[in-house]
């Protein structure tokens, strides 16, 4: 294939990408910068259960507006089901019904929310009823002892609640708290116990289930929070930090200790929640404009995918950026690395571990694994058994590092499991071979080169500009493809090789 064909292909890819980019930016008005991000989120719940063949009645607790969040829109996807909503014990619930259903059923709920302008909660003149006490025997005595203690160390209701949460915190539990909470306390059980103690102090309390919208995730269960009715309003308390106040991004999806999802006429019910921040108000307007001007163009875009799939592609679409950087640094600059895509995968792992922790864990894991690999060399093993043994050792090392970091209180160390273990294994094997054949200097040079490319790849891939541009304008990847094809024909000197041949240039002079 001649150069003319290659140049024609790269020009065609670039022109096609440029036309799509300009159409979306100039005609549809897709925003070019991620700076003007609207405080708006899409929340999706996927209710899944197995129907038993008869009448089905499925119920799901729904979010409602809070003092800091305003419900903009909500939609239900429930083909073949009747739908109604009602309030049950303070929670708004959706009820899907069908006369006859069998097999796996999937129902969807989606809501759009945005920050409200009035963060202050309204005052209510109606005091909710005190929940009845269910404690007896030693648990009742322990609750009374805890209440007597926190009353003696508090000045008002607010400080009483904070003292109670401190008393039930894992770091400061005494014998009374252990009797009240049992041998295996959970956040839900801790909040229920706190509500029982507060009932003895004539303070209505309840469990509130919520999602933090700033933490964009999918398949995440709601977390329990403690709410206490005091001075005419519900006050929200965080169980882990004992902090008071309703976070502006906390979306409450239900109240009480009952299940958030229930099914009659079925089993194995579960509700998985996904949270995604809207790109910005300009992007929403662009999508609406696109549906009017060119509906098919929008229907076949990434924005028409389910939320959980969009979250996956927000990461996958960034991998070509790392691959192009790797091609540039290897073929033009001349940086040596182990393998072709290993630095890109390591950069992908840095997204969860964060950069500094990721570098530290990578160096520690490869260093220990390299020492063990040299020991295995003394056993004279065949290649495949040696790689299998090394892979097992790498997995064990990951588990040991996670346990040790957890014991030391370094929760970031738990993310060592996010490293691709096969790539780590092959890196250790490749580095040991280079060490034996070309010396320690060459092995360290390639190892440091791989780490440098992974670091630069992380900085390029995972920033707001890259994530926004690549996901909103995926046609930009065609520019990367065209540039990669051109670099594939580059056969000139690499930048780091100019120093090697500098002596020859002097001799010619």
Image (cartoon, helix red, strand yellow):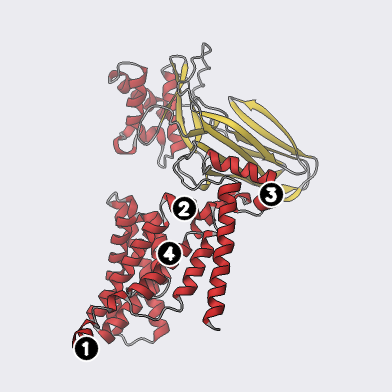
Task: Determine the CA span between mark 1 and mark 2.
Answer: 49 Å
Q: How many marks?
A: 4
Q: Residues within 10 Å of mark 1 (few under 14, many from 20)?
A: few
Q: Quadrant of the N terminus?
A: bottom right
Secondary structure at badge 1 equals helix
Q: Quadrant of residue 254?
A: top right
- Residue identified by numbered label 1: 508
Secondary structure at badge 3 equals loop
Task: Determine the CA span between mark 1 and mark 4.
Answer: 40 Å
- Residue identified by numbered label 2: 467
Task: Determine the CA span between mark 4 and mark 3.
Answer: 32 Å
Residue 346 lies, with reference to residue 276, above or below; the image says below
- Residue 309 visible from this viewpoint: no
- Residue identified by numbered label 3: 294
Residue 68 % position (x, y): 48, 27
Q: Residues within 10 Å of mark 4 (few under 14, many from 20)?
A: many
Q: Residues within 10 Å of mark 3 (few under 14, many from 20)?
A: few
- Residue identified by numbered label 4: 322
């Amino acid at each position: 294939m001649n150069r003319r064909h290659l140049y024609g292909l790269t020009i065609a890819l670039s022109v096609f990408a440029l036309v799509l980019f300009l159409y979306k930016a100039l005609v549809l008005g897709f925003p070019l910068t991620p700076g003007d991000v609207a405080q708006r989120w899409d929340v999706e719940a996927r209710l899944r259960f197995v129907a038993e063949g008869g009448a089905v009645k499925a119920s799901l607790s729904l979010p409602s507006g809070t003092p800091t969040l305003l419900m903009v829109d909500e939609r239900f996807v429930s083909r073949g089901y009747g739908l109604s909503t009602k309030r049950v014990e303070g929670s708004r619930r959706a009820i899907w019904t069908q006369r006859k259903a069998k097999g796996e059923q999937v129902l969807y709920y989606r809501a759009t929310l945005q920050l409200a302008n009035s963060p202050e909660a309204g005052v209510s003149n109606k005091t909710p009823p005190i929940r009845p006490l269910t404690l007896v025997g030693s648990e009742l005595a322990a609750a009374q002892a805890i209440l007597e203690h926190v009353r003696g160390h508090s000045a008002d209701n607010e400080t009483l609640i904070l003292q109670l949460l401190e008393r039930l915190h894992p770091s400061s539990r005494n014998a009374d708290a252990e009797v009240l909470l049992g041998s295996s306390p959970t956040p839900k059980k801790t909040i229920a116990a706190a509500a029982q103690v507060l009932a003895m102090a004539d303070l209505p309390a309840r469990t509130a289930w919520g999602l933090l919208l700033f933490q964009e995730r999918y398949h995440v269960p709601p977390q329990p929070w403690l709410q206490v009715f005091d001075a005419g309003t519900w006050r929200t308390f965080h169980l882990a930090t004992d902090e008071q106040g309703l976070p502006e991004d906390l979306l409450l999806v239900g109240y009480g200790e009952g299940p958030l999802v229930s099914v009659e006429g079925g089993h194995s019910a579960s509700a998985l929640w996904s949270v995604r921040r809207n790109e910005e108000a300009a992007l929403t307007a662009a999508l609406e404009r696109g549906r009017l001007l060119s509906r098919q163009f929008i229907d076949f875009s990434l924005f028409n995918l389910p939320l959980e799939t969009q979250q996956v592609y927000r990461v996958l679409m960034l991998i070509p950026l790392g691959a192009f950087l790797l091609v540039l640094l290897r073929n033009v600059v001349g940086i040596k690395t182990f393998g072709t895509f290993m630095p890109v995968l390591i950069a992908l792992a840095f997204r969860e571990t964060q950069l500094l922790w990721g570098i530290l864990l990578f160096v520690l894991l490869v260093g220990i694994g390299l020492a063990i690999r040299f020991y295995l060399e003394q056993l004279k093993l065949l290649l495949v058994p040696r790689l299998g043994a090394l892979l097992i050792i790498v997995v064990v090392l990951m588990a040991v590092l996670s346990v040790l970091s957890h014991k030391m209180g370094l929760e970031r160390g738990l993310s060592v499991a996010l490293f691709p273990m096969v790539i780590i294994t092959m890196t250790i094997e490749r580095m040991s071979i280079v060490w034996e054949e070309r010396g320690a200097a060459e092995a360290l040079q390639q190892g440091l080169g791989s780490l440098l490319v992974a670091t630069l790849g992380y900085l390029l891939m995972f920033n707001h500009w890259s994530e926004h541009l690549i996901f909103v304008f995926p046609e930009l990847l065609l520019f990367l493809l065209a540039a990669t094809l051109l670099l594939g024909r580059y056969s000139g000197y690499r930048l780091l090789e100019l120093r090697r041949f500098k002596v020859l240039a002097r001799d010619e002079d």
